[in-house]
Amino acid sequence: MIRRLFARLIPGRPSGEARIYGPEKHPVRRGQLSRGALDVARKLQQAGFRAFIVGGAVRDLMLGIAPKDFDIATDATPEQVKPLFRRAFIIGRRFRLVHVLLGPETVEVSTFRGRQTGDDAADEHGRLLTDNVFGTQAEDAIRRDFTMNALYFDPASESVWDFVGGVADVKARRLRLIGDPVTRFREDPVRMLRAARLAAKLGLAIEAKTAAPIPKLAPLIENVPPARLFDEMEKLLLSGHAVESLKSLRRHGLHHGMLPLLDVILEQPLGQRFIERSLANTDKRVLEGKPVSPGFLFATLLWHEVLASWNAAKGAGDRAIPALFAAMDRVLGQQAQRLAIPRRFEAVIKETWALQPRFEQRSGQRPFRLLEHPRFRAGYDFLRLRAESGEIAAELADWWERFQHASAEERAVMLRPDEERGRRRRSRRRGRRKPAAVALGGPDPASTPER
């Protein structure tokens, strides 16, 4: 089977033979690698093993992009890799790896994989359940997802090894799946999401044969474990190209079912404006190297469903704050069935939502207490998005913008009208409750017996 697959992928080349590109034929150099990746590869090679930088790092360097991390593939087993390094840990069950810790850097080392076989290798939909069969470098190449992710860089010789035509696809900026697309997408439905994300992030065109079965196979994503689905969605939304990624998802029919409430939200013009602004702001922060909160981002994606549920409960006569918390729990509960949002993010999401009614309280000490809240900045940024999308009046967000930067005297002026109105209301209520004589300490006429 391996021989036939190679014959289809690289016509005319001997089975299992790589095409090796010397340093004069590609732009990748060892000086572009991290120190940790170089040290790990060098130590493995000195111990008699083969070791290559592999995957997304080689792809990005070929495209002129600085990689975020570097992975290594080797013919050494995890048990052979671990003793070579002082701080190394074997992790994973479905896919056993070694994490080598070198200062602040973690280098992931994987053993060349072969194809998993047997009745228990896949579920009824074709999704692979185990992936721990070791194999040759050629077998490792063809079991990877896309051709440009199956390139191997040897730091010692600065050569690129290509078993599946990935170099040509990089030059053509073409995203092509290795093997039969239907089979490969069934093996791992997340590959469909990854195709949409990489195409948007790297500005690639998905090969027609690769893209053709995606709309029909999209329902297979429902079989992906929620935790893994959340990881892939987090990568997509924090890629710095979330706006284009969302367009790519919708173009290929992949947005249905991932965020179950997203379809409903995007059908509402107000919700769509809100989400597009949120994603655009997130992309800008990522590209500028600023920190981004996944919790805040998911809070924006789900807000309009919370808002719809909240408004419906208030319309039925429920009290505002209890109704808001009930809506929050309802929406997050529905979402948890498909997307396992970690609890640490749920806390951020709920606090961001719960702060929104407090921004409407602009008198007394309440604004000062809100300023001291640890989530104030996230809550205010969320409020600003609501104003920019037209959900609420811009005046409220503008008031808070001025108030948080104002001096003590300016804040007193901003608060005084509300305070004076409050004092007048309280004075009128006291006047209605007791006559003036009582207020001055005189007898209460109602308690004085008639003469």
Image: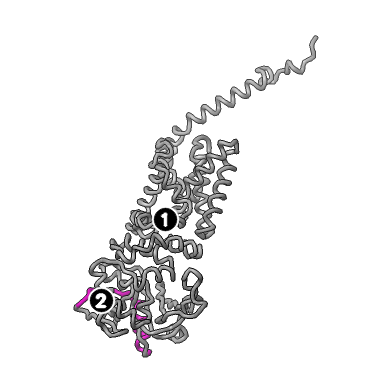
Mark linked to residue 29? 2
Q: Quadrant of residue 450?
A: top right
Q: Depth-wise, is mark 1 or mark 2 nearer the camera? A: 1
- The prevailing secondary structure element of the residues shown in magenta is helix
Name the amino acid, label 2: Arg
**Quarter in which the N terminus is drawn:** bottom left
The residue stretch that appears in magenta: 25-47
Sort mark 2 into few (<14), some (14-19) or many (20+) by Cα contacts within 10 Å.
some
Q: x%, y% of residue 317?
A: 60, 35
Name the amino acid, label 1: His
Based on the picture, tell me whether residue 8 belongs to the magenta stretch: no
Q: Is residue 199 left or right of residue 421?
A: left
Q: Is residue 19 left or right of residue 365?
A: left
Q: Quadrant of residue 48?
A: bottom left
Question: What is the residue that sits farthest to the bottom in this orientation?
Answer: 48
Task: Give the mark, 1 or 2, whose residue is nearer the N terminus.
Answer: 2
Tell me the CA gap for discs 1 and 2: 38 Å
Q: Residue at x 41, y 42 (%)?
A: 270
**Quarter in which the C terminus is drawn:** top right
Based on the picture, tell me whether residue 26 belongs to the magenta stretch: yes
Tell which of 191 and 60 is nearer to you. 191
Residue 280 appears in the figure: yes
Q: x%, y% of residue 45?
A: 35, 87
